[in-house]
Image (cartoon, rainbow, N blue to C red):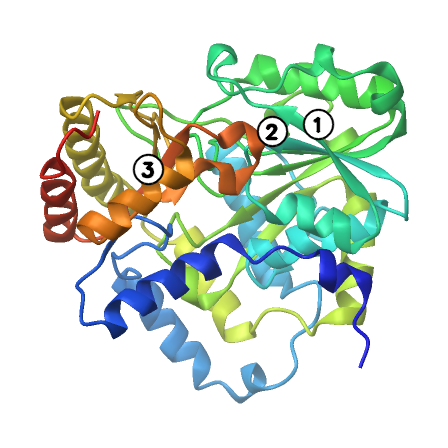
Amino acid sequence: MRFADRIEQLPPYLFAQISKKVAAKKAQGIDVVSFGIGDPDLPTPEHIVDALCEAAREPANHRYPETEGLPDFRRAVAGWYERRFGVTLDPDSEVLSLIGSKEGIGHVALCFIDPGDVALVPDPSYPVYEIGSMFAGGSAYHLPLLEANGFLPDLDAIPVEVAQRAKLLWLNYPNNPTGAVADLAFFERVVAFAKRHDVAVCHDGPYSEVAYDGYRPVSFLQAAGAKDVGIEFHSLSKSYNMTGWRIGMAAGNARIIDALMRVKSNLDSGASQAVQRMAMAALEGPQDCIAEHNAVYQRRRDRVVDALRTLGLRVTPPQASLYVWAKVPDGMTSAGFAERLLDEAAVIVTPGNGYGPHGEGYVRLSLTLADDRIDEGLRRIAGLPALA
């Protein structure tokens, strides 16, 4: 048999590789502490699970869902955006349900990218931004995210000829993997850039509710003119610990929402209606759980940052996201440092170059493992000789 060229070009998915490494160690009887994957260990709040149980018993929710999502779900999303960000959305034309935001992120490139087209992709970044463009037959132009620039892309440094060819610009703040944040002034510069070069903007914002020290992230859609040029992907996975339920949303420009809905209608059958009811309980119900979760993550963040600094690693405490982005010791590569931790301490961290060439020199540690496992992992790391 002969596979498509895109399969031959497709690199192994970063987190699938991490899972395989964990499984291989466990098969040897080794206890592994994994800081690798950002999958919240805290349970979905009880009132949200209760809503799912109730909805699961309704026969209407046993049938195929509509691609665009329940009208009530889309209204709940619009209401949440109004309350949280002061952003007004038409639930009928500017909101779309997703089977988790990853699904929409993977599909949206098909709305814009033809063979030979260019997508502007941050580096380092979530790998799906670039992979989606590759699946659509396009290529990625990497925008370096440098520590000196606060891990924000320098839009003025993009060559004019590249900007004119580009069809799509990807952004993600609070950022994965760096934990960096962006303000409204930056997003307003993005809108101006997009209008100047006729580029669509896709902002991935699943960490907007995971923030620390009183910081409140902004939405791209708050920027003046944002809905003229782009959409925002969001997810309930990290806000409400719902990764396993696969529910998210896209919101913003009505033409982009319609294009994405048409792609989805040909490739999937929409998100489970029972899970959409569950998501409505999350969005419209009590929000105390978010502050409670963030307090746990902030304590973990502080412990991880303090421990890594004690070991001589350079770390800036993130204001938001579920990750600590740490500079590896001088003279070591990202992969070399990660391999040493795995081989000598049975600790998994994610090498920064897995997110792009400009991630080299860093590793990412997730805060989504139980406190006792964090302490055990940090103890093991501290026990390594001549770490820094």
- The three-letter amino acid code for the residue at tag 3 is Phe
The answer to whether residue 164 is left or right of residue 141 is right
At a point 31% along the width and 50% down the height, the residue shown is 286
Q: Is residue 242 above or below residue 254?
A: below
The answer to whether residue 184 is left or right of residue 292 is right
The answer to whether residue 165 is left or right of residue 308 is right
The tag earlier along the polypeptide, 2 or 1, is 2
Q: Does dot 2 land on a helix, a strand or a loop? A: helix
Categorize mark 1 by other alpha carbons within 10 Å: few (<14), some (14-19), many (20+): many
Task: Give percent across and percent down for residue 38.
Answer: 37, 50
At a point 32% along the width and 72% down the height, the residue shown is 50
Whether residue 103 is visible here, answered yes or no, is yes
Which corner quadrant holds the N terminus?
bottom right
Task: Give percent across and percent down for residue 352.
Answer: 45, 36
Q: Does dot 1 land on a helix, a strand or a loop? A: helix
Of marks 1 and 3, the one in the foreground: 3
- The three-letter amino acid code for the residue at tag 1 is Ala
Q: Quadrant location of residue 18?
A: bottom left
Task: Tell me, yes or no, whether the two marked residues, 3 and 2, touch with CB atoms within 8 Å.
Answer: no
Which residue does the numbered mark 1 point to in the structure image?
226
Residue 220: mark: 2
Task: Give percent across and percent down for residue 263.
Answer: 80, 61
Categorize mark 3 by other alpha carbons within 10 Å: few (<14), some (14-19), many (20+): many
Task: Give percent across and percent down for residue 87.
Answer: 59, 32
Residue 337: mark: 3
Which corner quadrant holds the C terminus?
top left
- Residues under labels 3 and 2: Cα distance? 35 Å
Who is closer to the viewer here, 262 or 138? 138
Task: Tell me, yes or no, whether the two marked residues, 2 and 1, touch with CB atoms within 8 Å.
Answer: yes
- Residues under labels 1 and 3: Cα distance? 40 Å
